[in-house]
Image (cartoon, coloured by chain):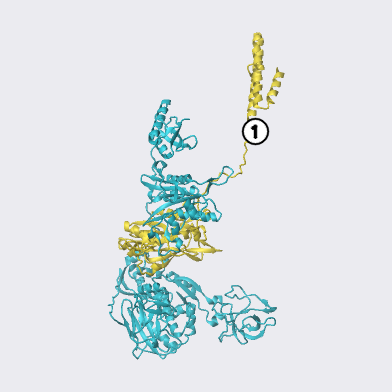
Chain colours: A cyan, B yellow
Amino acid sequence: MKFTLSWLKDHLDTTAQLPEILDRLTSLGLEVEGVDDPAEKLKSIVIADVVTREKHPNADRLSLCQIDAGTGELIQVVCGAPNARQGMKVAFAPIGAVIPSMGQALKKGKIRDIESCGMLCSARELEIGEGDEGILDLETSAKAGTPFAQAMGYNDPIIEIALTPNRADCFGVRGIARDLAASGLGTLKPLPYKEPAGTTPCPIQVHIHDSKACPGFSGVFIQNLKNGQSPDWVQNRLKAVGLRPINALVDVTNYLTYDLCRPLHVFDADKISGSLHVRFSKTGEKLEALNDKTYDLDDQTIVITDESKVLALGGIMGGIASGCTESTTSVFVECALFDPIRIALTGRKLNILSDARTRLERGVDSESLFYGQWAAITLIQEWCGGTASQIVMATHNAPTPLVSAKPITLTLEKLQGLTGCLILLQEAKVFLEKLGFSVVKNSEQSIDVLPPSHRHDIFESVDLIEEILRLKGYDVIPTTPLPSLPVQVPPASVTQLARRCAAARGLCEAVTWSFMDPAIAKLFGWEDLNLQLSNPISQDLSVMRPTILANLISASVRNKSRGIDNACLFEVGPQFEKSSQKKVLCGLRSGFQTPRHWSSSPRNVDVYDAKADALAILEAVGISESSLTIESSAPSYYHPGRSGALKQGNRVLAYFGQVHPKISQDLDSEQTLVGFEIFLDLINPPKIKKSALTLHPYQPVVRDFSFVLDRTVTADTLVKAVAKIDRSLITAVDVFDVYMGDKLPNEKKSLAIQVRFDPQKGTMTEADISDVSTKIITTVEKTTGGVLRQA
Amino acid sequence: MSQALNQWKEEIDSCPSLKEWEDLRVKLLGKSGEITLMLKELGKLDPEQRRTRGAEINHLKEVVSATLEERKAFLATAELNKKLQSETVDVTLSCRPEKSGSIHPVTQTIEEIVAYFSRLGFDVVEGPDIEDEEHNFNALNIPEHHPARQSHDTFYFPPDEQGQTKLLRTHTSPVQIRTMKKQQPPLRILAPGRVYRYDYDATHTPTFHQFEGLVVDKNIHMGHLKGCIEDFCRHFFGIKDLPVRFRPSFFPFTEPSAEIDVGYTREGNALKIGPGGSWLELGGCGMVHPKVLKNCGIDPDVYQGFAFGMGADRFAMLKYGIPDLRSFFESDVRWLKHYGFSPFSGS
């Protein structure tokens, strides 16, 4: 919402200066977004007379002017504008002046060898207009040397405030003035408009077909008027708030829209046939609106029609056919109330954002049916003359009984208990009354209050409390520390531990979009249409990601294209499936795990890097490797032979593996990619308690075994089988060699393990060692079919 | 004899290596070494001579042994030094490469915020990103046609089989609703998380991060809200005298509502949070609207409280001087390493 300082002062009698007004607006909740003071940027521009104009001796298109800028001596200026002429009043920028459009101080210069001591300005150069037709040709009686801004009325600061959706009333300058006055910054002037004394009945009747859609409508017929330009001060104000003056009749409606938050419509009465009707549109009806667009209507739009055609979209925009032109001599003025929801729906559906819609969809003052109409009649008659009929109020086909407003009770206890301030009801009452509320009951402990007709956002006592606090200023609320609680600071969460572990292992945390390209999502198994947005930013951000991995792969490809090879990334965030989401830590390594280095040859990432990441992170959140089983059942976006699932019982806690080469290729990755996904929701916070540990003094024993097994037997099967034999004695089983080759049959492999015995009861004898070794060999044979390899 | 001793000492002291030293030792003290032979000769002498001669030879032997040991130690040290010298490497060569990872600045920021509020007894709660209209809007007192609903620029999903329309949460406030529906006061919760708005330009991204605080109890008033927010802002930015301003605003789910501003100054293109003439908006807050409490089954005549919501990305940008929001989501490793945090940095 924009307005000017002088406009505000039409309604507010105040001695406050601009900075104080701006501060107060913000502390009232009417946040000042900007102030544009044209006088400030035009301060060095003055009115001047062109005393003589001659042709520039060295250039055909330039002229040489002698200027009187009120300094007592003539100033020579070279001018390039074709319209410069002797006797002209011009806007003159002397040496040292800053031209608004240039932003730099003007210097003395020579143009084609002739000295020029200043500049004659155009509207564009002064940023006060668009015109390209040369320098400003001023119509003013101001003497040479008068400041331009003062002489030409550019001394009215323009203030822009951001309005919250509840403050519909402040879409009019008067509402803003009322708030300022209530807060103590001056007094609200009474409205100057009286009910006009029309003598003839209005020849046009109005019928409302649905009282919910249009609760009230006042109309008036004015004849014998002459449409023309509105007064300069009105045009200046309209221009200041960004509106284009059109003609006096249209300007009246725009002016009152901003002045009193009272959108109006003026029909050319000669173009109306018979009575007016306010009703819902019928499917198939059309209207060519004032914005030159034609709208096809459904059966949900409030329209104003005459006996034969749709004239206007009620509360949103008028139609061209019934609009006012320069030749209009009689008008019908509409001043009506509409259902805000209907206005909002229609406005959104037809995508029309008009000043009328902005106000009516938030709700206007029902009393403005009267004073708004009076204002319209007054201004039209002032600016265009004419004779007004009596005001006609519309008849309702099925009137809705008026619901009388219920008073709101505000107790002292609530007022002080919610704000923490010692505000008294007496003070509260004064504030509320200044805002137009009426206090209908008044006791020591409570007041009963009725909100004014211009406020549609007041329903209960907390709304009253906000009003009171707003006027008093939030600064009076005493800053109070929160009551302290006996707090046990919780340990780091699973997510936090996992994240810190991933970063410690050399992965950089990324944050990527939760949505992705459906073409990519399909590669990762997405098929659930419920996860596709109806209104995505773009096609490639239209599906909720079924896995984070896809985004990390794209990120690594992007990094590679910027010359950053071997990106190692992770992200913690949601993955989506059906109507549920999982919290996942997903990691990706790409390219070389160990790059070229003098100490060793480079090595590509492989599945064991991803497995190591997954196991280390699980370990960090309290899940030991020994509690996990490994299955080769990872999703299809992993390499089928180089991936696995880490399970605890039936639950998959993590997947790891090489990314399926087909997917790497489809996503344009030229590097080897390995990744992992850890499902954090399934993991409980690690236990802090430790079990008791006994350390035994007996000599540990280490023995090596080498078994020949079928290739299908996994290392895990062998290791687990051995470990299970005696968990208290066998404390470690490690594979230290894997062999497949010429010395063994095709379908066989050999796995060599080192087994460590930590005896608890006494040092092991050769016989003890031999016993357990035999047990290992027989157990392995029984569970895996493996036999001890003969050296 | 002293002549012999001098000669031997000279021989020992000039012995060049441990190998030759051993030869020398054998030559002097070995089974048929010169001194050993001299001792063997003693038997042939009469007792008087034997005693005198014996003492002399023993003395000789002691001196020779000591000299030999001394030489041996010297030679051993010299040889070790020589060996070590030959093992010299170029210590300026680079180490075996180790990857260094980092924590994203927005998660670092959220962890810092969580840590602060945890110490005040706030429980961290999370909610789903895909929400329904009930939790994201209706229960928060944002009815269907409310203008505030339009300003949220919501991402929607097509209606499901039951005709229910899901959406991506536009704020973390639905977590308030979910918590209050499950749990009666007293409540202190902090809900950080991703939120989504249909907005993508220089200063907006379609995903960003908010954190939402909620305190409900019997006597929590606006003074507590101010105290809580002021303390937090000053602690987070580490500026004891940071000006914090509360300015009336409007949110359908709080009443009275306020916008939170902090002081800043501009240094070139960069914002510097701290005492200064200008105000920067950080977030919104207010007293929980009685309708919201009622919607969650909490009696607004008994309980009241406050809620606040702020943007974690913005907090990260302001505290750590990160100029561009969009870069948060680009996963450029150079950026992640530069603006990211060590896994061992505290929160």
Measured as percent of width and height from the top left, residue A441 is found at 29, 73
Q: Chain of mark 1?
A: B
Q: Which residue appears farthest toward the front when viewing the image?
A: A746
Q: Nearer the viewer, residue A381 or A758?
A: A758
Measured as percent of width and height from the top left, residue B118 is found at 40, 53
Is B345 situated left or right of A683 in this image?
right
Q: How many marks?
A: 1
Measured as percent of width and height from the top left, residue B277 is found at 51, 66
- Position above or below: B197 against B47: below
- Position above or below: B158 against A604: below
Q: Residue at x 37, y 47 (%)?
A: A651
Measured as percent of width and height from the top left, residue A524 is found at 43, 54
- Position above or below: A249 against A653: below
Dot 1, crowdedness within 10 Å: few (<14), some or many (≥20)? few
Can residue A262 be seen at all in this image of the molecule?
A: no
Quadrant for residue A292, please give it.
Answer: bottom left
Is A124 situated left or right of A361 in this image?
right
**Label 1's element?**
helix
Is A316 situated left or right of B340 in this image?
left
Where does label 1 land, which residue?
B82
Q: Nearer the viewer, residue A382 or A787?
A: A787
Q: Which residue appears farthest toward the top when viewing the image?
A: B46
> What amino acid does circle 1 point to?
Lys
Can residue A363 be seen at all in this image of the molecule?
A: yes
Q: Residue at x 61, y 87 (%)?
A: A87
